[in-house]
Amino acid sequence: MTAETPVSLWPDPDALGTVTDLYQLTMMAGYAAAGIDQSDATFELFVRKLPPNRSYMIFAGLEQAVGTLLGLRFSDEQVEGIRHWPVFSAIDPTWFDSLKQFRFTGDVWSVPEGSVVFANEPLLRVTAPLAQAQLVETILLASLGYPTLVASKASRIVEAARGRSVVDFGARRGHGPQAGFLNARASYLAGFSATSHVEAARRLQIPAVGTMAHAWVQSFGDEPTAFATFARLFPRATTLLVDTYDIEQGVRNAAAIEPAIQAIRIDSGDLVAASKSARAILDSLDRTGVKILVSNDLDENKIAELLDAGAPIDAFGVGTELITSRDAPAISMVYKLVELDGVGRIKKSAGKRTYPMAKQVYRSTTSAGKFAGDRVTRADESADGTSLLVPVIQSGRLVGNLPGLDAIKEYCRAQRESLPDRFRQIEADTSYPLDYSEALEAEAVKLGLK
Amino acid sequence: MTAETPVSLWPDPDALGTVTDLYQLTMMAGYAAAGIDQSDATFELFVRKLPPNRSYMIFAGLEQAVGTLLGLRFSDEQVEGIRHWPVFSAIDPTWFDSLKQFRFTGDVWSVPEGSVVFANEPLLRVTAPLAQAQLVETILLASLGYPTLVASKASRIVEAARGRSVVDFGARRGHGPQAGFLNARASYLAGFSATSHVEAARRLQIPAVGTMAHAWVQSFGDEPTAFATFARLFPRATTLLVDTYDIEQGVRNAAAIEPAIQAIRIDSGDLVAASKSARAILDSLDRTGVKILVSNDLDENKIAELLDAGAPIDAFGVGTELITSRDAPAISMVYKLVELDGVGRIKKSAGKRTYPMAKQVYRSTTSAGKFAGDRVTRADESADGTSLLVPVIQSGRLVGNLPGLDAIKEYCRAQRESLPDRFRQIEADTSYPLDYSEALEAEAVKLGLK
């Protein structure tokens, strides 16, 4: 077999039914054959353990997850493509036809996007016919896990920058081209001020930011010509990259531009020394208003070190460390059956136990309005504090409108500021108080979990 | 702003022009305004440094990168969307119109997909009008970097499994839903035998594999019923998950099924003890043909440990560690201008120097047919050994056909087997011999790089 036309690895967004693990389909078929596919099932999505170096997480990706659920379909081509796979040899052909009519008709409750959340509390709950609720596991985890990872990393980076601007330069380092989109959105809602990703900026109305590559400077005979040309063409957004050849000469060349440019960018070397030297040169040449942007494998630790060392930096461009969540590139987000036809379900696997029954989370606050602790309860209990899970989809339809991205960003900021300081440090307290209600513990005991 | 309909984060595969960093567009516009957009430019893509724990890389993602280049377009909606961005205030409106006619018309040379490659050698070379060659940087890096990461990780995992089967279970842990596709393809070509990803299996004709989730077992009143039902419905692919409640009892329940099932799966706990115990139980019940598949955060190190400890495991399911390339989730792949209108270009930035001129790589082999070392030369030089970069796109058209996925997989296997053993260990020699030709060194000196 040769590929005359390269096979696209962009799935059809209107037919994401097969963006799933095979076992979801075999189980769906099996539930139907066993006559339990319409049983009333509740699954819950939660994170087993905070990722390393994290004291909280920012829940993100809900809007796209909801869009995916509401639009989940199988194309005829997909159904015909899998119908004759050997694994399905004993499955009734009418089951395949039923896939062509698939619609998600269930309910979803979720914590709002941008929420500060912790391990071992339900973040999203699906109640639907068993076959539907089972199918969506893979794509829900793939849709929510990554944005939550990025938003959680971004939140730490924003804190480390102490009020200075942080912008997303990650697109080229994502795990495939789609990751760049998801990363731009998740980092913006968690406090980044702009992205270099053109399509994300356009479609999501995020401020777009860009400087120049070394190739621009290399493409002209000399640096002064390269700089002057750029400044003339982009008078409202001139950030000149000064380290292609010699940084100090680059800063002088940038300072010489009339009228004064907006900023310079340094992308290599010792950023403390280079930014101090650049600031001194700029100031000595009456360019006190020219900002300094730095980049080059920055993360929250390096940003904190730069600021601790007194580096006169105005803005940080962050790429690889953000988009790959490099120190914690995976999250132990899982989606587990907890209730079937009103009866609690558990699993006892070593290190992977799950509590039965549909749940709610109540968050209590101190008199100063700071988060004091979370309590996980049965969904039909009440407890002190604010309940976190709210209805998002009812009988397969959106409940009201989802918040816009700027509203989510503002909500996220307020959430982070409600966290006690000890959870907001770079090396933070990771033991936010969380417990399970007596009624929930009693359910677990009843089913033999304890 | 509220979102009544969730915004999709799936870009339009027929209009990927804006899946790029803003600076590529500003530079494109600037090159046009400066009258150098049609200059004959050569950029090269290479990896600065092997990722941690890697002694070689497997180059992957070429088919999709080529497809993206050949189909790269801007939609009218995209062009109108960015036309009035403040950054473009001084740009001639006709430049925006020219985007609507954008076509990639350049040449691409590349090492074949599935090649064993190393740091600091060109893997792909683009020669095109400067504006075109500049634009494609972001999407080329995003299309090639991730598959290369995954294939490189997968190759290590395949080696660690010493001939046993390894299958991809990563879909839910990818950095967004698209990563699952890319991961399935890249791991298969590097030696994995199957994937759980339904759409990847369907579209790329990769063998599909699946077992069952704990939810299946939990959904029936008892484990024997759950197992018997599954075995009846999926007689040609029955792998029973035995650890939902008690593993040993689970193995006994699985062994009791008539006729004998194909395999059991263990997904938690001490996999050495559990697999030994399971093997003993299965054998004692005359189920010597039932295979044991294990999963649970496996990587090459854990697989090697399991086999060193004599665990009687037949197949490994690998997810998170593979799809996130967890120990090395980023790769320092870059794309640099090396030649413009026949003149070499360099950059001198600290730690980021680049050599001038279009290049070729020659690989020499020992008399036993093993790789002996690589030499990077000027593209117009010749040297001993086999040249690695071959033409793939000429004047915007595919040169011949690309190889099919199974051919790439076979080529990759042969490449890996041509590596001397010392580079194939888990803790391997990372100093594969690579040097630059005298002519190339002389060019660098001439331009003041040294």
Image: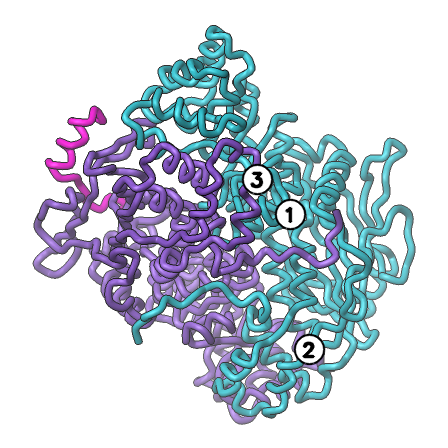
Chain colours: A cyan, B purple
Membership of B338 in magenta stretch:
no
Q: Is residue B430 above or below residue A6?
A: above
Along the viewing direction, whichever of B162 and A220 lies nearer the viewer = A220
Question: How far is disc 1 from disc 2 in space, using C-alphas?
Answer: 30 Å
Q: Is residue A77 above or below residue B429?
A: below
Q: Residue furthest top?
A: A284
Where is residue A52 drawn, in percent x and y?
58, 44
Task: Tell me whether the residue at label 3 lies in contact with that at label 1, contact meaning CB atoms closer than 8 angstroms.
Answer: no
Residue B450 in sight from this viewpoint: no
- Nearer the camera: disc 2 or disc 3: 3
Residue B333 in sight from this viewpoint: yes
Q: Chain under label 1?
A: A
In the rendered image, residues at marks 2 and 3 fall on the same chain = no
- Nearer the camera: disc 1 or disc 2: 2
Tag 3, which secondary structure?
A: loop
- Per the rendered image, the range of residues in magenta is B429-450
For this view, does B103 lie left or right of residue B442? right
Tag 2, which secondary structure?
A: helix
- Mark 2 residue crowding within 10 angstroms, few (<14) / some (14–19) / many (20+): many
Q: Residue drawn at (52%, 22%), measured in percent from left and top?
A: A262
Q: Chain under label 3?
A: B
Where is residue B339 drawn, in percent x and y?
24, 38
In the rendered image, residues at marks 3 and 1 fall on the same chain = no
Where is residue A356 drawn, in percent x and y?
78, 66
Task: Tell me whether the residue at label 2 lies in contact with that at label 3, contact meaning CB atoms closer than 8 angstroms.
Answer: no
> Label 1, on which residue?
A50
> Label 2, on which residue?
A131
Q: Amino acid at mark 1?
A: Leu
Q: Amino acid at mark 2?
A: Ala
For this view, does B393 lie left or right of residue A366? left
> Label 3, on which residue?
B84
